[in-house]
């Protein structure tokens, strides 16, 4: 059946989160690393793993006040400025890769290690190159996938990072996610399928701010990979500064609910006036019920960072159902490879 592998891995996520959290709570294979030992943190990855790195950097900087940034693996290879560090400063590099075999990621890790960085490698594949060369390996086997599109691996690695560098309150919040994820699947999968089929949508737009912006980028990528669908992601209010010119009745726009409801509702009403179909997700999504075509709230007790994997889940479903509507097979997306291997040309 077309898309069966992808759907199975998408819907298995709450169970995978539950197994992961139980293992981490038991202290099994939890890396012994403290941010207090470092002056800065650099998160690195490619593709989906770069968007994961952005979300991880946001989590660390907000909670620990340490300088944290995310860099695409390729930029580490191509721009020596990304690797340079002032004498005496200590750097933690957190490298994300589902396969642990991406050429660009492995080369980036080696470049950081060459200038003395300490590397925490996070991968879903046991025995991968990343886990072998990292100073401290962190295997997230619960995120392993047979499918090509990263779903369970993204949420599993993000959840593990949030647990590792989260407070006791954060960890308590993260433990509520498996049940919340099951509720989203049970209550919202059908309506999201109907939403994806409501019109012949040909443009997918995601708007988000703060901790949610990396999720908007990832949601857009899922639409591209699974449905081969034009997608865009913007910081929420930036969309009105030009890009809205292309919005029309065939645009499916997702807004990650803004913490400032006045600005968020103003934006939502402006978008609806353009004729778009509007989906709102996140802990504050219920406030938009009178404006949006559909809302998928995350538990209100969670902040945007804690709710990340729940807020992303409906967007994964939407991308999958859009692929089904368009007759695409998300198990075998066109022109994509599961692992990107770099083969430099001879010059």
Image (cartoon, rainbow, N blue to C red):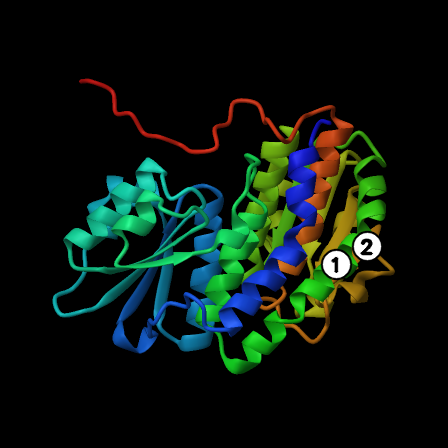
Q: Nearest the camera: 44 or 207?
A: 44
Secondary element type, mark 1:
helix
The image quadrant where one finds the N terminus is top right
Q: From the top left corner, tell me how far across and down residue 5 is, in percent.
A: 65, 35
Secondary element type, mark 2:
helix
Q: Do the residues labelled 1 and 2 touch (CB within 8 Å)?
A: yes
* Residue at image coords 80%, 29%: 200
Mark carried by residue 202: none
Q: Is residue 14 depicted above or below 318 in this figure?
A: below
Q: From the top left corner, tell me how far across and down residue 322 is, in percent.
A: 73, 34
Q: For label 2, count other residues whose C-alpha is less than 10 Å away and answer few (under 14), some (14-19) or many (20+).
A: few
Residue 199 as seen in the image, left or right of residue 242: right
Q: In which quarter of the image is residue 17?
A: bottom right
Q: Nearest the camera: 95 or 270?
A: 95
- Disc 2 marks which residue? 186
Q: Is residue 52 visible?
A: yes
Q: Is residue 283 depicted above or below 1 in this figure?
A: below
Q: Quadrant of residue 311?
A: bottom right
Q: Can residue 246 be seen in this view?
A: no
Q: From the top left corner, tell me how far across and down residue 85 is, in percent.
A: 18, 60
């Amino acid at each position: 059946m077309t898309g069966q592998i992808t759907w199975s891995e998408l819907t298995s996520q709450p169970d995978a989160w539950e197994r992961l959290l139980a293992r981490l709570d038991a202290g099994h294979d939890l890396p012994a690393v403290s941010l207090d030992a470092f002056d800065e943190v650099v998160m690195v990855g490619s593709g989906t793993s770069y968007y994961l790195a952005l979300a991880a950097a946001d989590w660390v900087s907000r909670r620990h006040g340490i300088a944290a940034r995310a860099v695409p693996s390729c930029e580490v290879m191509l721009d020596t400025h990304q690797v340079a560090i002032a004498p005496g400063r200590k750097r933690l590099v957190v490298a994300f890769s589902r396969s642990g075999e991406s050429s660009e990621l492995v080369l980036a890790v080696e470049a950081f290690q060459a200038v003395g960085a300490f590397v925490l490698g996070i991968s879903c594949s046991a025995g991968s190159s990343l886990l072998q060369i990292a100073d401290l390996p962190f295997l997230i086997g619960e995120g392993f996938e047979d499918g090509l599109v990263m779903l369970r691996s993204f949420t599993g690695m993000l959840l593990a990072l949030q647990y590792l560098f989260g407070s006791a309150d954060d960890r308590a919040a993260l433990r509520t996610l498996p049940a919340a994820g099951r509720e989203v699947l049970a209550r919202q999968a059908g309506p999201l399928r109907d939403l994806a089929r409501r019109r012949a949508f040909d443009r997918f737009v995601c708007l988000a701010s703060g901790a949610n912006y990396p999720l908007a980028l990832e949601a857009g990528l899922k639409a591209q990979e699974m449905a081969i669908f034009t997608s865009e992601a913007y910081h929420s209010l930036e969309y009105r500064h030009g890009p809205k010119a292309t919005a029309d009745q065939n645009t499916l726009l997702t807004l990650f609910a803004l913490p400032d409801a006045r600005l968020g509702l103003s934006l939502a009403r402006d978008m609806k006036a353009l004729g778009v179909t509007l989906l709102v997700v996140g802990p504050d999504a219920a406030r938009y019920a009178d404006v949006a075509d559909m809302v998928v709230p995350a538990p209100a007790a969670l902040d945007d960072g804690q709710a990340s994997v729940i807020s992303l889940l409906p967007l994964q479903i939407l991308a999958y159902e859009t692929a089904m509507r368009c007759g695409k097979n998300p198990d075998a997306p066109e022109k994509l490879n599961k692992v990107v291997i770099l083969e430099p040309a001879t010059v």
